[in-house]
Image (cartoon, grey):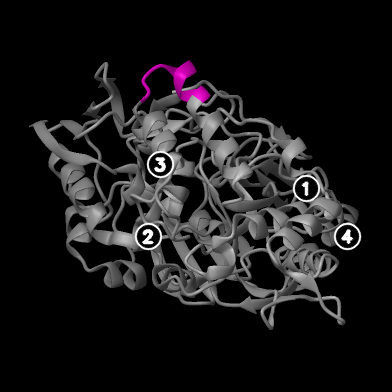
Amino acid sequence: MSALLLSACGSGDGGTGTGSPSSGGTLTFAVGSDAGCVDPQQVGSNDTIYSTRQLVDSLTDQDPATGKIVPWLAESWTVSKDATAFTFKLRPGVTFSDGTPLTAQVVKENFDAVPKLGIRALLAKSYLAGYAGTTVVDDHTAKVTFKQPNAQFLQASSTFSLGIESSATVRKTPEERCTKGVSGSGPFTLSSYVPNQSIALARRTGYAWGSSLFKKKGEAYLDKLVFKIVSESGVRTGSLQSGQLDAIGSVGLADEAALKGAGVRLQARANPGVVFGLGFNESRPLFQDEKVRQAISLAIDRAQIAGTVFPSGTKPATSVLSHTTPSYTDLSSRLALDKARAGSLLDEAGWKPGPDGIRSKNGAKLSFTITWAPVAATNQPSLELIQQQLKAVGVDVTLKLIQVAQFQVIQQKSDFDALWGNITRADPDILRTSYSTALANIYRLPPSELDKLLDRQVAATDPAERAKLVGQAQQWIVEHAVVAPVVELQTELGVAKKVHDLTFDASSRIQLHDTWIG
């Protein structure tokens, strides 16, 4: 796997501050949305990952500063030379919150069950593509094998998506896990879940197997974590300023000055993975025309969107991957605003300007719908700007708001023209998850050279060769406008001064084991 340096951006140092850490207290954290599920193997929304990540441990962890994979539930591991076999030696003495022990058999049951979750576990399933099985070598040794080389799997073993759950949890239906919760071995347990209102967690008594990256050994400091769902960014900001909340997610540019003025600490970090952008449904006739997709991409002023909507320091997209992703390639010259070229491409595709400025062809207007969910305060203003920018070249855009819990259904049924979204992962194999026709293929792409590039990079055991193939895949995606990349997601949190050591993990999600109030 390529070495990477995941740079921290923006202000904030995690609040290490002064004073000595102390145990106790409740952290109240407001997020903007609820994915309708509290199973980390089945969720992909940052707002829900913040809470559910605290319920489960992973076999490994990833250092956010270096990208190095380090021990967590696995004390050590070996990888075969051809990257088809990964043997994990498990830490003894680990238990789940239902009292049962962690064994190699439980690891096998988890990995055997993930592919059966289907599109409910889009990320987790993709990490196990080509899964041949898990062998229980002994009670504390599990050997995971694949039918072909799978260079991304070691990093995948560090993700929340492959967080290990108890045997009883694995046997539940996916719906039961979503609504009633899971038994993990994490530093917190689920106390209550009220959809669209709150998720409450309690400290796990006796927890003694934290990641090697955790500063504190043993149990977490905080007694309780309460995640409130507060959809209005202004309400989140005001509640944090008044002391009703301890931290908030999805801070927008408009909120920064008020929060700084109130003495709130802003913490920001660019997310690795696929940037925010428009993913086109290529089963729709309009988007089967590559020139139309290219024109839309060239008509978007990315710098304007990043500079006027997103938090300070946010970068416009310069590839389909963010600059903090391993093997990122700078393709900014291909993503520069060029309205003249966009117009020429639409002319060539037969779309001629009409009297109202909107182009038409054979009596049909050049129009499409962008489907989006309110998972970030920046989504609506970003899309309204895109709507204006595309209208300037004769494209009519309708915005369709759905709830985040509806996203899986929309994707599964391919019931959209274009989707607005991103996917965070600190490994470039996220491209295969998103765009391989052999996986979920939510954009209904036809088989192409891209499939071969994505398959070859995941099979490449030489880091330099893999980086070269990842670069070629990025070029293919941008040149053929499979997606119109727009802006890199930068996670920005507002954190009260009394909160210390609330830190980002390698995927720019939060780690709360070491967090304390004082």
Question: Mark 3: few, some, or many residues within 10 Å (few <14, many ≥20)?
Answer: some
Q: As displayed, is residue 262 above or below residue 460? A: below
- The type of residue carrying mark 4 is Ala
Q: As displayed, is residue 308 above or below residue 273? A: below
Q: Where is residue 108 in the image (x, y as percent from the top left)?
A: 17, 43
Q: Is mark 3 on a helix, strand or loop?
A: helix
User: Which numbered disc, 3 or 1, marks the residue that appears first in the sequence?
Assistant: 1
User: Which numbered disc, 2 or 1, marks the residue that appears first in the sequence?
Assistant: 2
Name the front one of labels 2 and 3: 3
Kindly indicate the quadrant of the structure image that contains residue 477.
top right
Tell me the residue at 16%/39% (across/down): 132
Real-space Cα separation, disc 4 to disc 2, in angstroms: 36 Å
Q: What element carries label 1?
A: strand
Mark 4 — residue? 258
Real-space Cα separation, disc 2 to disc 1, in angstroms: 31 Å
Marks 2 and 1: CB-CB under 8 Å?
A: no
Kindly indicate the quadrant of the structure image that contains residue 370.
bottom right
**What kind of secondary structure does the magenta stretch mostly adopt?**
helix
User: Which numbered disc, 2 or 3, marks the residue that appears first in the sequence?
Assistant: 2
